[in-house]
Structures are given as structure tokens and as C-alpha cells.
Image: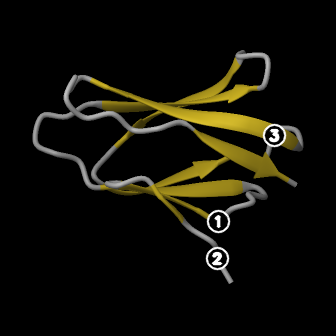
Amino acid sequence: KKLEKNLGKIRIFPKPIDNYIEIFKKKKKYEFVKSNICDLSGKIIAQKELHTGLNYWILSDMPKGIYIISFNNNNKLIKYPSQTLLKY
């Protein structure tokens, strides 16, 4: 069974992650959203621009551990909270 984390207009699954992550984004018109996965020291491990709909992100090269996924956009009125990811 897949577990999901709902961030308003962004859904991340499965959690915990294995070799991939799926991010579903309902993007507003003209909204640019970039996602960063960082280790606990703050080092960026991976980056991806999110498109409207389902985004499939292969993370098989990423070592097991705890990471933070954050979202940056060009709309100052909408904020997406960072979330913790566990890769096993």
C-alpha cells in the first residue's frame, strides 16, 4: 500500500521511498516550481523542475538515508512546505 503526503497542491508518494518518487503537482498558470532534495547538512543532492501532473523522479543512485525535499516557486503568495524523505 502506498502512503501519500498531501502538501495542498503537491502530493508525494510512496513514503518511505526506494528507487523512485512520484510527485503530483497541480500547477497554477505561469507558476514555476523547482524541487530540491538535500541531505541533512543542507547539500543539494538532486534538483528537478515540476510540471503540471505526475512527475516521476528516479533516485536509485541516491544512498539510503534521511533527506529534505523543498519547493521553490515564482509566486510569493503560495508557499509549499519542506518535507522529510526516508530512503531505504
34 with respect to 46 (left or right): left
Q: Which residue: 46% across, 38% down? A: 81
Q: Amino acid at mark 1?
A: Pro
Farthest left residue in view: 29
Q: Amino acid at mark 2?
A: Lys
Residue 73 visible, this orientation: yes
| Residue 37, image quadrant | top right
Q: Secondary structure at mark 1?
A: loop
Please name the residue that numbered disc 2 is placed on: 2
Badge 3 crowding class, 10 Å Cα cut-off, few under 14, some 14 to 19, many 20 or more, is some
Please name the residue that numbered disc 3 is placed on: 66
Q: Are marks 3 and 2 in contact (CB under 8 Å)?
A: no
6 with respect to 67 (left or right): left
Mark 2 vs mark 1: which is more N-terminal? 2
Q: Which residue: 81% across, 40% down? A: 66
Residue 59 visible, this orientation: no
Q: Secondary structure at mark 3?
A: strand
Badge 2 crowding class, 10 Å Cα cut-off, few under 14, some 14 to 19, many 20 or more, is few
Q: Quadrant of the N terminus?
A: bottom right
Q: Are marks 2 and 1 in contact (CB under 8 Å)?
A: yes
Mark 3 vs mark 1: which is more N-terminal? 1
Residue 56, percent across and down? 52, 55
Q: CA distance from mark 2 to mark 1?
A: 5 Å
Residue 26, percent across and down? 26, 55
Q: CA distance from mark 3 to mark 1?
A: 14 Å
Q: Which residue: 63% across, 72% down? A: 3
Residue 51, percent across and down? 32, 45
Q: Which residue: 27% across, 51% down? A: 52
Q: CA distance from mark 3 to mark 2?
A: 19 Å
Mark 3 vs mark 2: which is more N-terminal? 2
Please name the residue that numbered disc 1 is placed on: 14
Looking at the image, residue 77 lies above or below residue 4: above
